[in-house]
Structure formats: C-alpha cells, structure tokens
Amino acid sequence: MKKITFAIIAMLIALFSMVSGAYAQLDDVDVNISSVKMDILYVGVSNPVSINIAGMSPDSFTAEISSGAIFRKSGSDWIANIKVPGTATISCISKEDYKVLLTKKFRVKNIPTPKAYLSVGDNLITSGNISKSMLSNARIVAKIDDFDFDVKFGITEFTLLTYVKGFANNAESRSSNLTADQVKIVQQISPGGVVVIENIKAKGPDGKNHDLGSLCFKVR
C-alpha cells in the first residue's frame, strides 16, 4: 500500500514539474502585438503599433506585415502603413533563428468620410448668417470629428450657387478657396439672400475621393 502511495505522489510531483516548466517556457517568449490607437489599422495613415517581447531586446527581433510596410520607430514602437482595406497580419520574427514568435491579424479599414466646413477665421461653421466679406474670404475644409488620427484632406472642387433677381447663378472652384467669379456672385447677393455651397469633394491621404454634400448660409 505504501509503495502505491509513494508512486502516486511521485507521479503528481512529476506532473507538477512538467506543468511549471511549460509555463516558464511560455513566459520566456511572452509576445504582445497591439495597435496603439485601436485594434483596427487604417489605410493611408501611419498606424502606431507596439510590439513587446518579455526578456528580449528590441534589436533581437523584427516584424513583417502581409500587406503594406512596417518599420521600427524606436524601441517597441513600430509604424504600419497599408494601402488597401481588408486584413493584415503582423508577424514577429526572431533574428537569431528566424523563428516566428507570434502573428496577429488586424482589420484594415478606409478612413471615415470627413465632414465639410466653411472656415471663417478661427471658426468652422456649417450654416447660419454670414456677411459678404466673411464669405468672400472664407475657404472650404474637410475634417473628421472624434477620430484618433490627424488626417489631412484636400478640397478638390465645390460649386457656389445662389439666386440673383430670380435667376440661378453659380460658379465652380477647383480648390478650397472661392474663385474671382464666385466672389463676384457673392457681392451681388442682397441681404437675406441664400447661398449654397454644393458638390463639395475632398481627397484624403488614402487617395480616395469623398463626396461631402453641401452647406447653406444666409447672407446678411
């Protein structure tokens, strides 16, 4: 009976040692890959990614991405640049034996469609009353509200439309600023007249064209 008891104890000790050894081995290669901003990567922006490996120097491993490019900024900080939406896999690879330590998939999305604003001095407005001089010197801008990245958009075109003496009068611009013809139209608007800025289009860093709709103002 004692022999059986000792045998059982010995087996339990051996099993405990194996389990402890397995966890110790996992701790030696504790790898974490995460997006600093969120668990989604975006097309056309510099996505910050953090790669940490417990017990390993940042110089002892590298990283690869299945779509786009990834490079180390400093330490555990990396930057991922991606050109197409879908999925992207980041792999962490040991430089010593080229062993893949960990892979992680990320969803890749296009950046959201921005919102159009009329930039008047330090203010961004979408409607309301405006003077002729303020409107003539304003410009159209595109901005994403409540987004983790500071994304720059370029206004590629817009149309200014109003009615002068009952007749529609409009002119196009191929930039964010009013053209000379558009300013002339503004100067002809009587107080209380309505001006519409429509067909606003913008282009983001992802190369995608965005249709931003229209803005409407009342001239005072």
Image (cartoon, grey):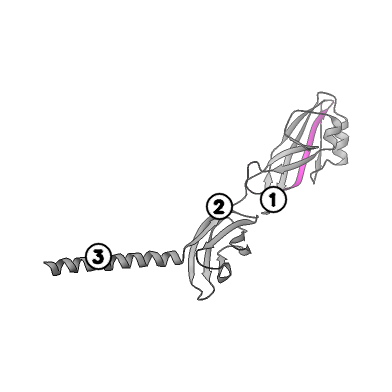
The image position of residue 29, as x and y in percent, is: 46, 66
Q: Of label 3 and label 2, which has the lower sequence position?
A: 3
Q: Quadrant of the C terminus?
A: top right
Q: Is residue 139 above or below residue 94?
A: above
At a point 88% along the width and 30% down the height, the residue shown is 188
> Dots 3 and 2: beta carbons under 8 Å?
no
Question: Could you tell me the amino acid type at mark 1?
Answer: Gly
Q: Of label 2 and label 1, which has the lower sequence position?
A: 2
- For the residue pair 163 and 82, the one nearer the viewer reads as 82
- For the residue pair 132 and 98, the one nearer the viewer reads as 98
Residue highlighted by disc 1: 204
Numbered disc in front, either 2 or 1: 2
What is the span of residues highlighted in magenta in the rendered image? 146-168
Q: What is the total number of numbered labels drawn onto the structure image? A: 3
Numbered disc in front, either 3 or 2: 3
Locate residue 31 relative to residue 192 in the image: left or right: left
Residue highlighted by disc 2: 40
Residue highlighted by disc 3: 12
Question: Could you tell me the amino acid type at mark 3?
Answer: Leu
